Image (cartoon, rainbow, N blue to C red):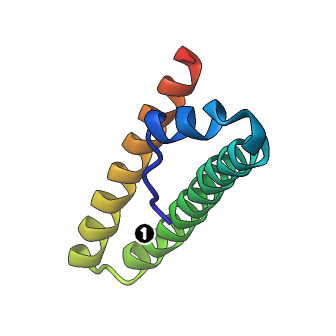
Amino acid sequence: MDKYYSYTDFLKAVGHYQHANESEKLLNDIYLDLFLNRMQRLQRIEQLKDLIDSALDERNEEAFYSYTKELNELQESQELDESQETLM
């Protein structure tokens, strides 16, 4: 799902006036991919919180540290994405 869309590709699609549908399709693909990535990340964050709770209940220190590390990384990437969105 992590597709790379370059600004150049977008400009090429937009530059062809007779192919306006191509640029709209590319833009829709970009937005859909961003949306799905965000939903997947949010779902994984919730899943990790549940796994952390279970690890605490079971006193599984190794699992706890593993899940919290992944959770922190996801939350950092989410904060980075949100800060980039506000700049746009």
Q: Which residue is mark 1?
A: 52
- Percent position of residue 86, x then y: 58, 19
Most foreground residue, 80 or 13: 13
Q: Secondary structure at mark 1?
A: helix
Type of the residue with mark 1? Ile
Most foreground residue, 57 or 12: 12
Most foreground residue, 35 or 22: 22
Query: Farthest residue toward the front?
Result: 18
- Percent position of residue 66, x then y: 26, 69
Q: Is residue 60 left or right of residue 17?
A: left
Query: Farthest residue toward the left?
Result: 62
**In the image, is residue 7 above or below residue 38?**
above
Question: Residue at point 64% right, 58% down?
Answer: 39
Most foreground residue, 86 or 6: 6
Image quadrant containing the C terminus: top right
Residue 42 lies in quadrant: bottom right
Question: Residue at point 28% right, 77% down?
Answer: 63
- Percent position of residue 21, x then y: 78, 47
Question: Residue at point 55% right, 32% down?
Answer: 11
Q: Is residue 13 left or right of residue 25?
A: left
Question: Residue at point 48% right, 25% down?
Answer: 84
**In the image, is residue 58 above or below residue 80?**
below
Residue 29 lies in quadrant: bottom right
